[in-house]
Amino acid sequence: MTTLTPPVVTYRMPAEWEPHQACWLAFPSHEDLWMESLEAARREFVDLCQAIADPDPVSGECRGERLEILVLNEAGKAIAEAALQGISARFHVIPFGDIWLRDIGPIFRVEPDGNVVTVRFNFNGWGEKYILPGDAEVAKNISDRLNLPSHHFPVTLEGGAIEVDGEGTCLTTRQCLLNTNRNPQLTQSELEEILHAAFGVSKVLWLNQGLLNDHTDGHIDTIARFVAPGVVLCMESRDADDPNAAVLTEIAENLSKMTDAKGRPLQVIQIPSPGKIVDDNGEIVPASYANFYIGNRTVVVPTYGAKYDQEAVEAIAKLFPTRHTIGRSAKAILLGGGAFHCITQQQPTGRQQHQAEV
């Protein structure tokens, strides 16, 4: 962990629990990628959208946050509109390779004057594992569509690799950010300076590695999440056959020794791990209850049909007493590589009122 000492900046990436203007997603569309799981992934996607938008049961008016949803073409837009009927959403025909908006989309930052800008990085398919047409251009295309000022940093970084508290602290992992398949030319210190310049953080906390078989190389949003200033959530193993038992123990121990940018010792809250979750071929998949999305009115927690699903949802609910915490199935989406946080990107509330309509 390192405390940075560059000149003070007043822009910042807000914490996820701060107010959102909208949530960005991409409708599951590629049959060649999802195959027989496509319809199940779409059902889980719609359930997530319903929970985030939280429409009034009588008027249908959105009580949560507006959804901004990418579709591939007009035919795909018609399918998405039908699937999301009754849910407030705007649809954008923008090419994308798959639904992982947290990683391929822009990240939003609030400036000193209260206006929102986008922050963009290079995207290389999670270390050149999955190079899909359109993904590398999504962040710029969304920024252009919104007509927002945009800052591009010519380094490789995905949104799921960082977690901020809105008060100057950033969590990340060495396995991802220091991986030779991302930015082999950069040192840890240089990457910390980039995180400062991009998001206004003053302290970077480094965990070592993430979950087994995580093709993102240890994204932080599957292992540790800020839930309030000075408070971080992680998971603990309950089963002897949990493939992540040792890693989860190390994460909790390391977090317990850390302080945030304001000098507060981190309060570490543990919830159960889902345990050993496998796909149809018996391969272990990186299931995580930490991959939840914090919306304006709801917290949506991924569930996997595991025996700890309900306990995890109830534990997270206690951390967000002013929101409604909901567990929703994410097992089909997980087979594609992630869960709810991976497929969402919050757009914080700002002063701009000129976002383009479609």
Image: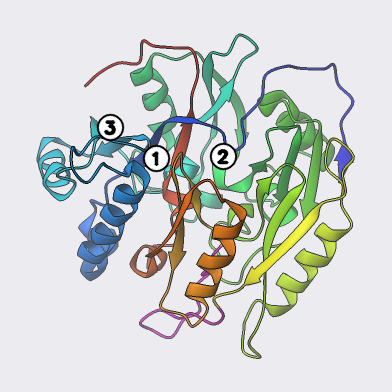
What predominant SS class does the magenta segment belong to? loop
Instruction: Name above or below for residue 55 compared with residue 231.
Output: above
Could you say where residue 270 lies in the image, as x and y percent from the top left? 69, 67
Label 1 sits on a secondary structure element that is helix
Could you say where residue 335 lies in the image, as x and y percent from the top left? 39, 68
What's the magenta region? 275-289
Category of crowding for the residue at label 3, using alpha-carbon neighbours closer than 10 angstroms: few (below 14), some (14–19), many (at least 20): some
Name the amino acid, label 1. Asp
Which of the labelled discs sits on residue 94, or is there none? 3
User: Who comes first in sequence, dot 3 or dot 1?
Assistant: 3
Name the amino acid, label 3. Ile
Q: Which residue is mark 2?
A: 16
Image side of residue 319 versus residue 262, left or right: left
How far is mark 1 from mark 2, CA to CA? 23 Å
Identified at 74% across, 77% down, the residue is 246
Name the amino acid, label 2. Glu
Q: Are marks 3 and 2 in contact (CB under 8 Å)?
A: no
Which of the labelled discs sits on residue 135, or is there none? 1
Category of crowding for the residue at label 2, using alpha-carbon neighbours closer than 10 angstroms: few (below 14), some (14–19), many (at least 20): many
Q: Is residue 157 magenta?
A: no
Instruction: Name above or below for residue 196 compared with residue 338.
Output: above
Q: Is residue 280 magenta?
A: yes
Identified at 24% across, 36% down, the residue is 88
Among the 4 quarters of the image, the one containing residue 211: bottom right
Label 3 sits on a secondary structure element that is loop
